[in-house]
Image: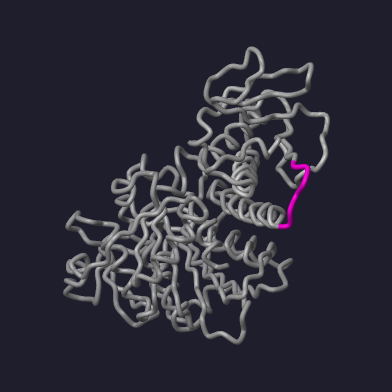
């Protein structure tokens, strides 16, 4: 199925699909089952039954659009005005359908040679009169879902085809077309000169060099305010010498998703051109084992100068982020830091795959991200910072910090507290997407749209 790219203002030859609700005047033989489509092919029209009109909102429209893109039995032209309800204006219909259809219709990386199911039918939008406001909503929705799909495609790509060097090169080449973005790729020697020894410690077991990719956008050069996004970019996480059990190693290609997300946000920003300053840092390596890989009990010095005893090599994401956060605070002069990472299994046990866990050091930071998430219909839940969560990690006899709290309690919160140590007291938001990023092996990539919305 092709992606939606325009709104048509006249009828095409496809069957016109209209919404119909409980209590509406229904044509003969209409099937009144939720989301069931009844076709009247002599009239070249079909109706989808959607229950009570008063209950049909944005989420219902989005889920219907996703399902329709995957399963429609023929090509339809959607009569958008018929889906408007008291809970959902025409702009909401356009936004939900654009994002939902293009999410499902997008063909991400796939090397299947048989049984690959692709819906050959097509969907199109019909709206006789398009206001500039509606058109603006449509264009923005296209940019947001395209950015989300860009990140999804990187995430689902297997690790033998996307190592740290390859990921950095993809960004460098792809972003050349955005003349309002400045992209810099730091290689090993430059990383060493910066003193990013936490990142380098994770890379010790790899045959590939680490990379730090810095993407900068200056939408308001006269302002000192700058948001810096930091993304975890572990292209595969074996756990290192703290080796993961085989079952829990599956899906670790997604451990670079945070870096893909911050890159996707910058792609959207380059097109939407907000009057703000936003930068992104991708901290990229894999976490493997060889004869020189980092050993538990090793101590390394971070870019900030703080020393870290690595008591668990499988808690590597916070190590690469720590150096990235400090770089953002001190070299890019962030006034707000936001990191995003598939960081802890504990967040999945806490919030499942429904909510993304969010930590914020100020009420303003929380209010801003919550407002953006509400606009983009993404579910987030505020989690606590508390000094109690870092007590164990500050108990090392040989270093300033341990990288893991082995009490077994509040593992996501202790990870957040570890990262906060490297923010140089800059306002800080931490997003743990380990539960919402990929579900049942499929790339979902929560928070792309929310972080874009925050940047506007």
User: Could you tell me which quadrant the N terminus lies in?
Assistant: top right
> Residue 260 is drawn in which quadrant?
bottom right
Picture residue at 41% right of the left edge, 74% below the top:
323
Instruction: Say which residue appears at 48% left-offset and 64% top-offset.
Output: 231
Place residue 303 in its image quadrant. bottom left
Q: x and y percent of residue 165 in the render?
A: 58, 62
Q: Is residue 59 above or below residue 379?
A: above
Residue 84 in the image: x percent, y percent?
61, 40
State how many labels appear. 0
Return the x and y of residue 176 as percentages of the image width and height: 72, 68
Residue 90: % across, % down: 64, 46
Of the pair 166 and 213, the residue shown nearer to us: 213
- In the rendered image, residue 128 lying in the magenta stretch gets the answer yes
Left or right of 204, for residue 144: right
Q: Which residue sits at x=44%, y=63%?
A: 369
Q: Quadrant of the C terminus?
A: bottom right
The residue closer to the viewer here, 86 or 44, is 86
Magenta run includes residue 164: no
Q: Is residue 283 left or right of residue 26?
A: left
Q: Pick the residue in front: 238 or 173.
A: 173
Which residue is farthest top?
A: 29
Q: How is the image coloured?
A: one colour
Pick the front one: 174 or 59? 59
Q: Name the dominant secondary structure of the magenta segment.
A: loop
The span shown in magenta is: 127-132
């Amino acid at each position: 199925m092709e992606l939606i790219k325009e709104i048509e203002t006249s009828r095409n030859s496809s069957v016109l699909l209209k919404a119909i609700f409980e209590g509406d005047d229904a044509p003969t033989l209409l099937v009144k089952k939720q989301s069931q489509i009844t076709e009247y092919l002599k009239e070249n029209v079909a109706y989808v039954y959607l229950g009570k009109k008063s209950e049909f909102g944005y989420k219902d429209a989005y889920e219907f659009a996703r399902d329709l893109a995957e399963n429609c039995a023929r090509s339809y032209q959607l009569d958008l005005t018929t889906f408007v309800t008291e809970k959902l204006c025409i702009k909401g219909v356009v936004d939900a359908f654009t994002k939902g259809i293009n999410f499902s219709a997008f063909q991400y990386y796939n090397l299947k040679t048989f049984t690959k199911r692709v819906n050959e039918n097509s969907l199109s939008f019909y709206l006789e009169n398009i206001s500039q406001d509606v058109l603006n909503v449509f264009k923005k929705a296209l940019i947001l879902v395209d950015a989300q799909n860009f990140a999804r495609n990187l995430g689902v790509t297997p690790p033998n085809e996307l190592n740290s060097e390859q990921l950095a090169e993809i960004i460098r080449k792809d972003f050349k077309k955005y003349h309002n973005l400045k992209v810099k790729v730091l290689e090993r020697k430059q990383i060493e000169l910066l003193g990013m020894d936490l990142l380098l410690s994770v890379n010790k077991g790899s045959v590939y060099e680490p990379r730090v990719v810095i993407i900068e956008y200056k939408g308001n050069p006269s302002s000192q305010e700058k948001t810096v996004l930091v993304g975890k970019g572990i292209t595969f996480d074996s756990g290192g010498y703290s080796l993961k059990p085989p079952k829990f190693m599956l899906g670790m290609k997604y451990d670079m998703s945070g870096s893909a997300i911050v890159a996707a946000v910058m792609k959207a920003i380059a097109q939407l051109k907000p009057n703000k300053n936003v930068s992104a840092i991708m901290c990229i390596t894999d976490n493997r084992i060889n004869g020189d890989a980092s050993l538990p009990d090793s101590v390394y010095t971070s870019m900030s100068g703080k020393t870290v005893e690595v008591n668990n090599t499988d808690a590597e994401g916070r190590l690469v982020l720590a150096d990235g956060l400090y770089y953002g605070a001190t070299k890019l002069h962030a006034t707000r830091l936001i990191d995003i990472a598939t960081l802890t299994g504990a967040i999945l046990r806490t919030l499942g795959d429904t909510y993304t866990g969010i930590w914020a050091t100020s009420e303003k930071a929380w209010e801003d991200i919550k407002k953006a998430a509400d606009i983009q219909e993404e579910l987030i839940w505020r989690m606590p910072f508390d000094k109690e969560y870092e007590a164990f990690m500050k108990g090392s006899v040989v270093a300033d910090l341990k990288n893991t709290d082995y009490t077994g309690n509040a593992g996501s919160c202790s990870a957040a507290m570890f990262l906060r140590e490297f923010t140089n007291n800059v306002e800080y938001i931490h997003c743990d997407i380990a539960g919402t990023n990929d579900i049942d092996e499929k790339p979902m990539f929560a928070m792309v749209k929310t972080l874009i919305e925050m940047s506007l």
